[in-house]
Image: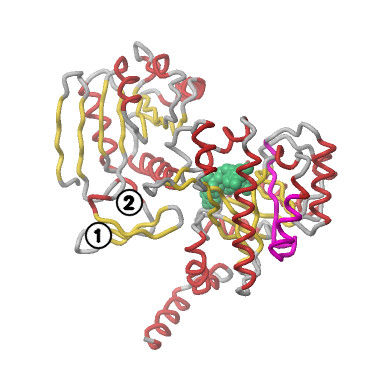
Amino acid sequence: MFATVTKTQSKAGIDHTSAVPRTPFFLTTSKCVTRFESGLILYAAHGELKLTSMAAAPQTHILIIADTAVIAKRIRRLLERVHSASYTSVAADKAKEVILASDFHLVVLVDLLSHNPNPLSLLFNIQKHINVIAFDSLAEANARQVASQISNAQLNLVSVLPLPCPNARLQSVMERMTDDLQAGKLGQTPRSVGEIEAAIAQGLIIPWYQPKISTLTAELTGFEALARWQEANGDIIHPSTFITVAENHSIIHILTRQILTDVITQLRDWWVDGHEWQISVNASVDDLESDDFVTWLGDSIERAGIPGSALIIEVTESRVSKNFAVLLYNLTQLKKMGIGLAIDDFGTGYASLQQLNRMPFTELKIDQSFVTGAHLDKDKRVILENSVSIGHGLGLEVVAEGIETGEDWWHVRKCGVDIGQGWFIGRPMAASSVLNWVKDWETRAEYFVDPPTLTSQLKRWLSSWIRH
Ligand code: C2E
Ligand code: MG
Ligand code: MG
């Protein structure tokens, strides 16, 4: 399956196997890839199409922690059947130093419970974001214990899999992981306060935009602004590595205002050009409890000459309010200015229904964990359906985030969700990509209302053939 495999055995007993694959790991599963004869590849990443050469394409690095070379080789073969990557294998007692020395997208553990010494005791509190897949010969009996040991060690568990493992199961786990890696959910280490402060000061943290679509008409209603930290070398750092740190060190106010300032400028430009979209911006509860936030925001939108209704402020349920009365007062002031107010990640946090009822929200966003794959999972379905009725019962617009597939889209429509957001519609993208995305959307929006049939596809193909 792979073109070349080179292998070197280092003195420290670390086995680096660098498979130079025909198709890099993340591309094997990408849904939007074209490979040209010249060796150039067109691929989708972070909401944008990128052209790269085979050699420059990003590749996944996997570390296998195994007692013996035989086991390491067996695991590598298993993984290679569904994905290509570069592999390093190491014994448990050397794992920490190898992990600290370089970045791996994934660490693979084998039969954790019978491992001696337990690699988790060595990796505990390693201060690095580590994604783990654990293979276990007795997965049925051990899965829960393995999962809880990995989570307790502060590592990010991707999956516990049986050994031997069916190809289809392994492939679906790896595809899911690849998507999450591309979305920046995995594999990035939290940033320090100093780094975040410097990035804010240099204007490196900017909003990207993810479309929101009416489920009834498939019309674009607006975008959610999501913070992205763009490094000088082009790398994109995702919010999971800096938002919580910024919140915990009281610098979230600066970040939120910087994002809002950018969004308001962008909104003014779009509105002037006749694109009257609504942009949702995430704010922390701490922002909304600060004394001057409302006045600052009011002044900013007035200066830009845009109406309050062009903005929606999203507040996540997961942060506890320190001063509920102030929060309530400030939200009410924002609503008086015409600004929309959304409760984000609904279903995951602490808000009681009574609190929800007292807050002047206009929109309820159902967390993606109850949306993605809900048609296959009864528990998710029940929560999704009930969230829709709670939202509608309170007179709120209901948004579903995490629409990853056509099945998710048709399902949320059936459940009565008003607005959809997710990778199936569009990934977050830089402001410079938005107008092109909108043009493309206009050519495919009709299929989000009427699913394509063979006849409609043929008609579409025929009319475009006649046009050209
Ligand atoms: P959120 O506000 O709930 O934003 C939705 C998240 O889901 C985004 O992650 C988005 O990229 C991701 N997403 C969208 N569609 C899909 C999908 O179909 N499947 C999956 N698996 N994920 C999808 P992102 O951009 O990494 O942001 C994560 C969280 O960071 C946000 O969750 C929000 O709570 C926080 N955040 C982002 N930007 C800001 C900001 O400017 N200020 C504050 N305070 N928080 C922010
Ligand atoms: Mg949000
Ligand atoms: Mg959310």
In the image, the segment drawn in magenta is: 296-318
Nearer to me, 278 or 369: 278
The count of marks equals 2
277 falls in the magenta region: no
Q: On screen, 328 above or below 190?
A: below
Give the number of the disc on residue 40. Answer: 1
Q: Quadrant of residue 415?
A: bottom right
Name the residue carrying label 2.
Answer: 27
Q: On screen, 129 above or below 297?
A: above
Is residue 262 something one can see in this rendering?
Answer: yes
List the single residue furthest toward the bottom.
Answer: 466
Q: Disc 1 vs disc 2: which is toward the camera?
A: 1
Give the number of the disc on residue 119. Answer: none
Q: Which residue is found at the position 25% from the left and 55% from the top?
A: 53
List the single residue furthest toward the top.
Answer: 117
Task: Using a 10 Å C-alpha cutoff, classify the residue at mark 1 as few (fewer than 14 neighbours), some (14 to 19) or many (20 or more).
Answer: some
**Left/right of residue 154 with respect to residue 357 in the rendered view:** left
Which of the two labelled residues, at mark 1 and mark 2, occupies the earlier sequence position?
2
- Label 1 residue SS: strand
Q: Amino acid at mark 2?
A: Leu
Q: Quadrant of residue 134?
A: top left
Nearer to me, 309 or 264: 264
**Left/right of residue 157 with respect to residue 212 in the rendered view:** left
Nearer to me, 156 or 381: 156
Q: Whole-percent x and y of residue 405?
A: 50, 56
**Left/right of residue 31 with respect to residue 228 in the rendered view:** left
